[in-house]
Image (tube, rainbow, N blue to C red):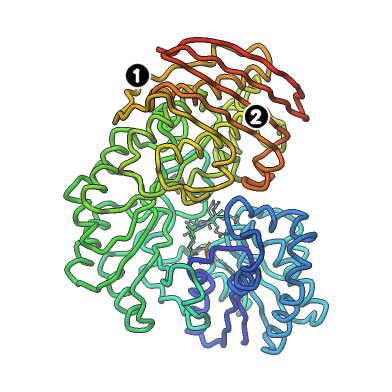
């Protein structure tokens, strides 16, 4: 059979697509002729000259909603027609697309174009989005086959028209992916991806990927042999492990890094990893010796209560220890962060800001995220009542009982977190620590800047009791706690802080920015402050208010 596998935009541009390259290997081994297309990277290079970078997190909405039809489609329609020409020239019997929520819209257009010109070709869909949207009718209506499981056995069943078995894939015997259809220099990180494990050992409340498949790991010796094969075949020296977490089986992970060091393969690598108290300084030194570039941790919050509610099953002490030991051993850290988990109060958020300050030296890079969302199949989605979520969405997003945690609260927290990262000089991979947009959002003058190292977590204060009579007053404490932590870190200061729905939307995207505008002026001398706030909101709980109040910080 002649088969095409493709990835449409938008998806990651750092590495060539892993999943369809793995499937190509499997199909080729079974005697089929396969050609892969990465339309994602083609369109990235095609749209690079545009003012907007459509591939950064804040701009995914351009690919997901009507923005795709109105803005992106007209720009790339000719290019898409060329893709269809190239596909049809190849004369395949099957075309498979890998689906993400960020490329579903574009894929749908391509399929329609193909079907219009040749209705005989069978269309297969697979990938995370099929997994998540199992029962979405639009997927079934446009394709002939949907694979909403692991694809290794399934794709052969589709092609050979055989009965699917519930057999779990043994990743220890998988072939290495076939990356021969791509030009590696087109990609950001000049490397390749592989897997050391599949699935996750944890069950975090917000996470959907833990529900995809059962946890399995590759043996250390298998991985080393795989890496040797990659090096021989592709001569590539940088690798990304595409696991949810590379250290799910800590003993095998230790074995692997020791072997990697002994074998001296001359490679660098990066991976997601779980915080684990067993990774002490000696362990971290071994990781460093194995050629690690960085580890990317899901830390999410600096509040133990929130971490517990998330069921992260990690504690602040071991997080701080991993970051510190990693720093000493030279293992660079990337932190994944999450603002606004349902049970996160303004006090918890203050603890998070203190955590970031105290660990600023040990964090090389952070992605502050897009605030907490409700992922399909996640515990938040299935058991919202446990997390005090109201059954309805407001501002297209979740709210908790009494409107305590809403999209408005979360956006104020997120934007203040971005500003905080600038003030304490942690590199923010999502926006760039020198973001000009962000610098225009605030103006700060320190009266006599302090130079302290650590803020005691016990200094965190719950400001929410001060003002909670109305929805607008429930937002005051978001500002107060932010100003408080600045005071604790740097001493007295004055500051103006702006929120503007239009400029904020252009930076953070419409998924998280709602109809909120504010100008907040804050001034303090010694420990007395004065806060003036003018803010308005147009939808759901509208208000237009100017207030001023004074107080003291200890
Ligand atoms: C590694 C990873 C990344 C890497 C990607 C590196 C790379 N080279 O691709 C990085 C860090 C860059 C990344 C970024 C992002 N990621 Co990511 N990532 C992952 C992760 C952890 C593993 C992906 C992987 O390779 N898995 C292993 C392969 C083998 O599995 P697979 O892709 O599902 O493919 C199998 C099956 O689905 C099936 N299959 C796949 N395609 C097809 C096609 C056909 C025809 C068939 C029959 C079968 C089939 O067969 C395959 C083999 O079994 C997954 C979670 C997970 N555990 O899967 C999230 C995941 C894919 N990422 C996700 C997201 C949201 C993102 C970001 C948008 C996050 C963000 N907000 O920035 C960005 C997107 C980047 C962009 N647009 O620029 C989501 C996607 C959700 C969705 N429904 O679309 C996932 C599922 C995590 C989650 N649930 O939240 N990510
Ligand atoms: S968030 Fe990370 S550690 Fe938690 S369940 Fe998901 S993949 Fe596993």
The image shows residue 53 at horizontal and vertical percentages of 61, 60
Front residue of this view, candidates 263 and 237: 237
Q: In what element is the residue under mark 2?
A: loop
Q: In what element is the residue under mark 1?
A: helix
Q: Residues within 10 Å of mark 2 (few under 14, many from 20)?
A: many
The image shows residue 276 at horizontal and vertical percentages of 29, 43
The image shows residue 200 at horizontal and vertical percentages of 42, 51
Q: Residue furthest right?
A: 116
> Is 366 left or right of 217, judged from the image as shown?
right
Residue position marked by numbered label 1 in the rendering: 458
Asked if residue 245 is positioned above or below residue 533 in the image, the reply reads: below
For the C terminus, the image quarter is top left
Q: Quadrant of residue 261?
A: bottom left
Marks 2/1: CA distance?
Answer: 29 Å
Asked if residue 276 is positioned above or below residue 50 in the image, the reply reads: above
> Is 63 left or right of 176, judged from the image as shown?
right
> Is 388 left or right of 427, judged from the image as shown?
right
**Marks 2 and 1, the one that precedes in the sequence:** 2
Q: Nearer the viewer, mark 2 or mark 1?
A: 1
The image shows residue 56 at horizontal and vertical percentages of 58, 56
Res. 399 mark = 2
Front residue of this view, candidates 543 and 127: 543
Res. 508 mark = none
Q: Residues within 10 Å of mark 1 (few under 14, many from 20)?
A: few
For the N terminus, the image quarter is bottom right
């Amino acid at each position: 059979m002649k088969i095409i596998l493709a990835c449409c935009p938008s998806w990651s541009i750092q590495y060539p697509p892993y999943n369809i390259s793995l499937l190509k290997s499997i199909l080729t081994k079974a005697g089929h002729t396969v050609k892969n297309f990465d339309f994602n990277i083609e369109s990235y290079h095609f749209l690079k000259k545009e003012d907007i970078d459509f591939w950064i997190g804040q701009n995914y909405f351009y690919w997901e909603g009507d923005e795709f039809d109105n803005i992106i489609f007209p720009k790339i329609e000719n290019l898409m027609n060329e893709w269809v020409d190239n596909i049809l020239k190849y004369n395949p019997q099957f075309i498979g697309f890998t689906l993400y929520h960020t490329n579903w819209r574009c894929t749908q257009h391509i399929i329609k174009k193909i079907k219009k010109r040749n209705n005989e070709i069978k269309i297969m869909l697979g990938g995370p989005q099929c997994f998540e949207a199992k029962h979405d009718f639009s997927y079934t209506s446009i394709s002939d086959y949907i694979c909403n499981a692991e694809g290794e056995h399934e794709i052969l069943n589709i092609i050979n028209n055989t009965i699917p078995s519930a057999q779990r894939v043994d990743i220890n015997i998988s072939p290495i992916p076939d990356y021969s259809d791509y030009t590696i220099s087109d990609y950001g990180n000049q490397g390749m991806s592989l897997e050391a494990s599949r699935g996750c050992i944890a069950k975090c409340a917000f996470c959907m990927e833990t529900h995809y498949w059962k946890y399995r790991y590759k043996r250390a010796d298998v991985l080393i042999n795989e890496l040797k094969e990659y090096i021989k075949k592709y001569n590539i020296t940088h690798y990304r492990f595409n696991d949810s977490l590379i250290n799910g089986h800590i003993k095998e992970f230790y074995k692997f890094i020791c072997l990697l060091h002994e074998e001296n393969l001359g490679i660098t690598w990066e991976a997601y990893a779980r915080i684990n108290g067993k990774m002490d300084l000696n362990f971290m030194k071994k990781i460093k010796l194995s050629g690690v570039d960085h580890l990317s941790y899901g830390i999410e919050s600096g509040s133990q209560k929130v971490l517990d509610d998330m069921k992260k099953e990690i504690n602040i002490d071991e997080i701080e220890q991993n970051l510190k030991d990693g720093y000493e051993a030279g293992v660079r850290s990337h932190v994944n962060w999450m603002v606004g988990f349902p049970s996160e109060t303004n006090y918890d958020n203050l603890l998070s800001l203190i955590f970031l300050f105290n660990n600023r030296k040990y964090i090389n890079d952070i992605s502050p995220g897009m605030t907490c969302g409700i992922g399909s199949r996640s515990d938040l989605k299935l058991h919202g009542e446990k997390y005090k979520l109201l059954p309805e969405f407001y501002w297209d997003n979740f709210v908790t009982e009494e409107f305590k945690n809403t999209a408005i609260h979360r956006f104020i927290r997120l934007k203040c977190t971005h500003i905080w990262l600038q003030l304490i000089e942690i590199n923010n991979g999502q926006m760039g620590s020198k973001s000009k947009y962000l610098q225009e959002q605030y103006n700060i003058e320190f009266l006599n800047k302090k130079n302290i190292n650590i803020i005691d977590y016990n200094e965190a204060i719950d400001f929410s009791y001060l003002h909670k009579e109305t929805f607008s007053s429930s937002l005051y404490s978001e500002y107060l706690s932010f100003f408080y932590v600045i005071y604790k870190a740097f001493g007295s200061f004055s500051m103006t802080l702006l929120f503007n729905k239009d400029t904020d939307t252009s930076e953070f995207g419409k998924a998280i920015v709602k109809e909120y505008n504010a100008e907040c002026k804050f001034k303090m001398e010694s420990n007395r402050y004065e806060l003036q706030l003018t803010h308005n909101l147009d939808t759901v709980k509208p208000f237009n208010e100017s207030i001023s109040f004074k107080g003291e910080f200890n």
